[in-house]
């Protein structure tokens, strides 16, 4: 089968035929229709220090997918043959303390598709049946495959209440764009997008941000405080991983506010705990993965509501063999979500 793989411990990715995977008793084989490029895939492509420590070559890359179930293991009752599914990409053990206490996203034996095992940049992928989310076959798989990163956005935005609240989304790459969309769909009163990329800030406005701030031209702290009578915003969703953006967000979050952090800085960040957190009485949430499967249920209801702008968030749909162009777009930040169409459905 056709794949995009990391063949050697070096920069880049290779289109290469690899053997079709084998479907176990609790698994399903999925014919991949569409897959999207994640920032994680870019890190693996670039072979950054994290990828060097984590990726074992050769490995098929990719984790965000939608496809058709074409084979089911003998223990599988759902999904059924022919179902169109997207996948929760964290494969969990089901037996550790976290799994048993309904916190599977924290499973201590988590394996991530395309990171710890062969991934979805392929014509076929095998997944545990329990990881499949049966999706609407009438929706273009190019939009179904982004339910996984959409889940990251939902988990971040909805880790507390946003209805009627003022919300800052810091970093409007693809997941930040989704977070703007989700915050508005969940009834946020006022959403401000903060980034340093004008193209992405204009996309954020398109999906509903009330205000966009380019932190290169305008101080987000002064702008947000001036617009909120010096109170600041109720909720900050940190999706940038930028230490500077993170520390400035502590200056414009309202006392008693909630900060949910999904973005990953490259290293430790110095924070004034006293003034940034303790005296402000704020709550900080670390966000990892998606709640299984509560986040997917909320995602489905948001998609069904018609309030999301997935067709604006997906800016590029490319044939599978044009993946290099996809990675280039991601490197340059000239895109929202980039989707590769693997097989015509
Ligand atoms: Zn991803
Ligand atoms: Zn577990």
Image (cartoon, rainbow, N blue to C red):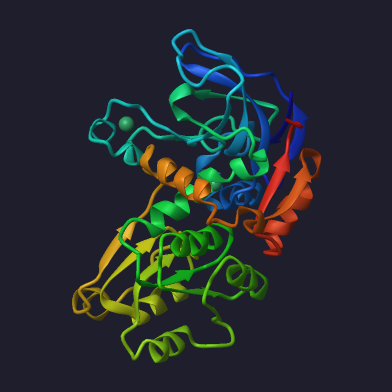
Q: Is residue 108 left or right of residue 337?
A: left
Q: Residue at x 53, y 18 (%)?
A: 80
Q: Position of residue 59 (x, y in %)?
A: 62, 32
**Figure quadrant of residue 143:** top right
Q: Is residue 231 above or below residue 65?
A: below
Q: Quadrant of the C terminus?
A: top right
Residue at the location (35% across, 27% down)? 93
Q: Quadrant of residue 183?
A: bottom left
Quarter holding the N terminus is: top right
Q: Position of residue 32 (x, y in %)?
A: 66, 30
Provide residue 53's location: percent of width, then percent of height.
50, 44
Most extreme residue toward the front is 305
Q: Is residue 9 visible?
A: no
- Image quadrant in which you'd find residue 164: bottom left
Q: Is residue 152 visible?
A: yes
Relative horizontal placement of residue 183, taking residue 105 as reference (left or right): right
Residue 224: where, in percent of width, then height? 42, 85
Seen in the image, is 162 located left or right of residue 27?
left
């Amino acid at each position: 089968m056709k794949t995009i793989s990391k063949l050697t411990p070096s920069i880049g990715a290779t289109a290469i035929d690899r053997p079709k995977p084998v479907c176990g008793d609790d698994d399903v084989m999925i014919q991949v229709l569409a897959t999207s490029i994640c920032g994680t895939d870019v890190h693996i492509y670039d072979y950054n220090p994290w990828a060097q420590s984590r990726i074992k070559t050769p490995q098929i890359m990719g984790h965000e997918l939608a496809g058709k179930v074409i084979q089911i293991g003998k223990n599988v009752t759902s999904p059924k043959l022919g179902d169109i599914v997207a996948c929760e990409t964290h494969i969990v053990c089901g037996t550790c303390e976290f799994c048993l206490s309904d916190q599977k996203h924290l499973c201590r034996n988590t394996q991530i598709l395309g990171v710890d095992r062969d991934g979805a940049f392929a014509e076929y992928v095998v997944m545990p049946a329990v990881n499949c989310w049966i999706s609407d076959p009438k929706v273009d798989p190019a939009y179904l495959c982004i339910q996984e990163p959409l889940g990251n956005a939902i988990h971040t935005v909805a880790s507390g209440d946003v209805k009627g609240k003022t919300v800052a989304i810091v970093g409007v790459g693809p997941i930040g764009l989704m977070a703007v969309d989700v915050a508005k769909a969940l009834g946020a009163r006022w959403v401000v997008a903060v980034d340093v990329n004008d193209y992405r800030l204009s996309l954020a406005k398109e999906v509903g941000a009330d205000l966009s701030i380019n932190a290169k031209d305008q101080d987000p702290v002064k702008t947000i405080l001036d617009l909120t009578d010096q109170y600041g915003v109720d909720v900050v969703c940190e999706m940038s991983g930028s230490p500077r953006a993170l520390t400035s967000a502590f200056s414009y979050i309202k006392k008693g506010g909630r900060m949910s952090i999904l973005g990953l800085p490259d290293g430790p960040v110095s924070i004034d705990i006293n003034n940034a957190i303790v005296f402000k009485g704020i709550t900080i949430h670390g966000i990892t993965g998606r709640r299984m499967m509560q986040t997917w249920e909320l995602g489905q209801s948001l998609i069904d509501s018609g309030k999301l702008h997935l067709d604006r968030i997906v800016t590029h749909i490319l044939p599978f063999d044009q993946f290099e162009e996809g990675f280039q777009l991601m490197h340059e930040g000239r895109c929202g979500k980039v989707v590769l169409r693997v097989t015509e459905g």
